[in-house]
Amino acid sequence: MRWRLLISLAAFLVLGAAVSSAAVSSAAVTGAAANTPAQSAAETTATANTPAQSAAETTATANTPAQSAAGPLDIRGSWKPETYRLKSGPVHEVTGLITFTGKDWSVLFFIVTDEGPRRGSGEGGTYTLDGDKLTFRHLYNLSGGHAVEGFEASDLSMKVRPKDAEDAPSEPCAITIEEDLLTIFFPSGNQMAFRRSSD
């Protein structure tokens, strides 16, 4: 009888251990399965954030040209005049040079036709530049020449003013710069285009 009791007890212990082990394995599998959606959700959230970061990078890239275009215009150096377009319609070929330093300017230009240079002007003084607003202050002027379309013949005229002259005429203009082309829009409605010659 005793050995039968011992066999029954051993069988009971083995069965209990098997049941317990199965329960633990099942709980572990269930816990692992329960954690998987949470990890997937985290991965989904991270993936969902990626387009937002890309959009931010795209926006920053898109702003670069605007920031560059908004930078200060630099007119310092020398520019060769190419065309002189009058408000009344005629467009003349011109040659010469306009030069800007940090605060001074001077220009010498000629209107040229098939007959050669027909009229010209030499001018200079100081200037200010605020954004695209260029204001010439005229201290020196030498001009004259033959009649061309849009201009009557004029005698040689010379004018010199001291640097501190209170009566020095101011000429507010607008400008544009596209690559190496400078266009000056004068208050008269005329405009002149210059090609950069040197810095």
Image: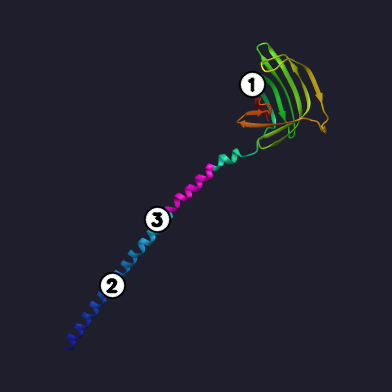
Q: Position of residue 178 (x, y in %)?
A: 60, 31
Q: Is residue 163 above or below residue 37?
A: above
Q: Nearer the viewer, residue 67 or 154?
A: 154
The part of the chain drawn in magenta is 48-62
Which residue is located at x 69 percent, y 28 percent?
78
User: Are there few (<14), some (14-19), or many (20+) residues within 10 Å of tag 2?
Assistant: few
Which residue is located at x 22 percent, y 80 percent?
12
Judged by depth in the image, the label closer to the viewer, 3 or 2, is: 3
Judged by depth in the image, the label closer to the viewer, 1 or 2, is: 1
Residue on which the image places disc 1: 88
Q: Is residue 59 magenta?
A: yes
Identified by mark 2, the residue type is: Ala
Identified by mark 1, the residue type is: Ser
Which residue is located at x 68 percent, y 32 percent?
75
Residue on which the image places disc 3: 44
Q: Quadrant of residue 44?
A: bottom left
Q: Quadrant of the C terminus?
A: top right
Identified by mark 3, the residue type is: Thr
Residue on which the image places disc 2: 23
